[in-house]
Image (cartoon, rainbow, N blue to C red):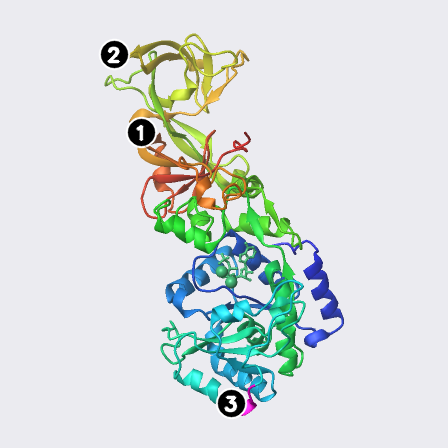
Amino acid sequence: DPAMPSNFIYDAVADDVAQGKRGGRVQTRFPPEPNGFLHIGHAKAIVVDFGVADDFGGICVLRLDDTNPETEDVSFVESIADDIRWLGYDPADERFASDYFEQLYAWAEQLIEAGLAYVDDQNGEEISASRGGFGRPGVNSPYRDRTVEENLDLFRRMRAGEFGDGTHVLRAKIDMAHENMQMRDPVMYRIRRAHHHRTGDSWAIYPTYDWAHGQSDAIEGVTHSLCTLEFESHRPLYDWFLEKLGIPDAPRQYEFARLELTHTVTSKRRLAKLVFDGVVDGWDDPRMPTLRGLRRRGYPASAIRAFCREVGTTRTNSRQSIEYLESYVRRDLNATAQRRMAVLRPLKLRLTNWPTDENGDPVVEHFEIANNPERTEDGTRKVAFTGELWIEQEDFQEVPPPKYFRLSPGREVRLRGAYLVTATDVVKDDEGNVVEVHATYDPETKGGNAPDGRRVKSTMHWVSAPHAEDATVALYDRLFTAEAPGERTGEALDDLNPESREVLSGCKVEAALSDTAPGDVVQFERLGYFAADTEQPMLFHRTVGLRDEWAA
Ligand code: ATP
Ligand code: MG
Ligand code: MG
């Protein structure tokens, strides 16, 4: 990939490297909590974390931030590692914050000994109530001035599991009147008798994000700890812990804006609800903004990377339009996807003057059609053609409306790469629906061009009926109707689009499509890009249309 467009993080890192700060090294980390699947927002963070490391010849480590045992699970660890690899990145190492629990504990005792941390017996409610507010100082805990010995004793007993959940916490002793709320004696440890997916039952206390994060960065040798803007107010605390521990060459935290997309939610909690409520089929439903969902939908990893790079790394939260992401997907697929013909809503087209062979069977011809006109090296394929074909229902109108240039009685059109045909009459069912169209073909127009130079206004895709394969095609609309889901009522799920998926069975597709590898994306001519399902044969998901068709 090309280097990231220059941005403030890039500039800060370049400065540090030029000044030889932290040994002139660059090491970043991507620190997901293993409590869900990665989504498009995480992709942005991954591209920034790995991109900065790559661009400065450094490394990026995957750190599982596994400090909340109740919500985390080992299955997420595997999916996260797998999704990062799919996106195209290879972590230099895979680490776990839980690997550092012992060191974090030792450092906590060090802070207690320095008179910089204390055990508080207040419960969570009391602690929040005494925090104060903006312009309103907090109130010191009645336990704030415990002796070092008493604090050490209590902290060791917290660790030993002598106290019930929620009865005690360890807090940093900073300043209850600090203008930054994060600095008002933040909690470092909570008692949680929870089974941890890696450390089992060996710990009864778990570190908070604020206590674990910067110290984990320091242990790993991270130089630049890149995170999203909501952590900006945590930065003084990040620095405070490292300074009080006397850690040399301490890492620095830099914040950038979260990536949000229109018509999309990227909160794990809301995405989980979509899955549990059965709104979608699972975390990898092609409508989900998870990397699994986007992948199943056919989004190329390279398009997601390019999008994340190009939206820029800024310090202003904003919502990017989903059309913009789609434009990257389309650009990528236009260059790579093989062209095929598929008829989604079939209507029979019979060529009444099509010849028969010596046995009285209709002649079958084969046309060589380019696999991808954008890339001649992809060659051609043979597509069977005969007198009985499938065309799209919407490509025929018995009484054409104004400006309708596709097939109608008396109108000549081109069947792509094959012949010019003229509709003559129709066959209707009892209810008056057109069930078959009759047409004549002009044998002089083989390949699709008339020797006399006459022009037709429309070129249509087709599939030979006796050679067609059956397929099922899923068409997708936005999962949320509102640009900013939840803006109206506060609940994003109120803006769900009830018609986000339309499944068409009985589609007729050219035989070559049965060779599509699971997960491959092809272009159905005139219809868009479609991904072959990874499990069900002959099921195709529409990745994206050929052009922006959403515009209202
Ligand atoms: P969620 O709110 O969905 O639970 P999170 O931020 O808690 O997300 P983590 O697993 O902690 O999820 O995230 C790992 C990293 O990805 C963090 O550095 C976080 O800042 C970053 N990240 C998460 N969501 C986004 C987003 N929408 N845009 C950019 N970065 C993100
Ligand atoms: Mg988080
Ligand atoms: Mg979270």
Decide which of 454, 321 is in the foreground and name it: 321
Identify the residue at horizontal 45%, vertical 63% (top origin).
81
Q: Which label sits on residue 467? A: 1
Mark closer to the chain start, 1 or 2: 2
Foreground: disc 2 or disc 3: 3
Element class at badge 3: helix
Would you name the residue on which mark 2 appears? 430
Q: Which quadrant of the rendered structure holds the N terminus?
A: bottom right
- Dot 1 alpha-carbon crowd within 10 angstroms: few under 14, some 14 to 19, many 20 or more: some
Task: Say the numbered circle drawn on residue 237.
Answer: none
The amino acid sitting under disc 2 is: Asp
Span shown in magenta: 146-151
Percent across and percent down for residue 512 are 37, 36
Amino acid on which the number 1 mark rests in the picture: His
Nearer-N-terminus badge (2/3): 3
Q: Position of residue 384 (x, y in %)?
A: 36, 28
Viewer-proximal residue among 137 and 539: 137
Which residue position holds label 3?
150
Which residue is nearer to you in this view: 179 or 454?
179
**Spot occupied by residue 533 in the image (x, y as percentages of width and height):** 37, 44
Main secondary structure along the magenta-highlighted residues: helix
Task: Tell me the CA gap for discs 1 and 3.
Answer: 84 Å
Q: Residue at x 50, y 55 (%)?
A: 87
Q: Residue at x 50, y 44 (%)?
A: 486
Q: Is residue 510 magenta?
A: no
- Viewer-side residue, 27 vs 492: 492
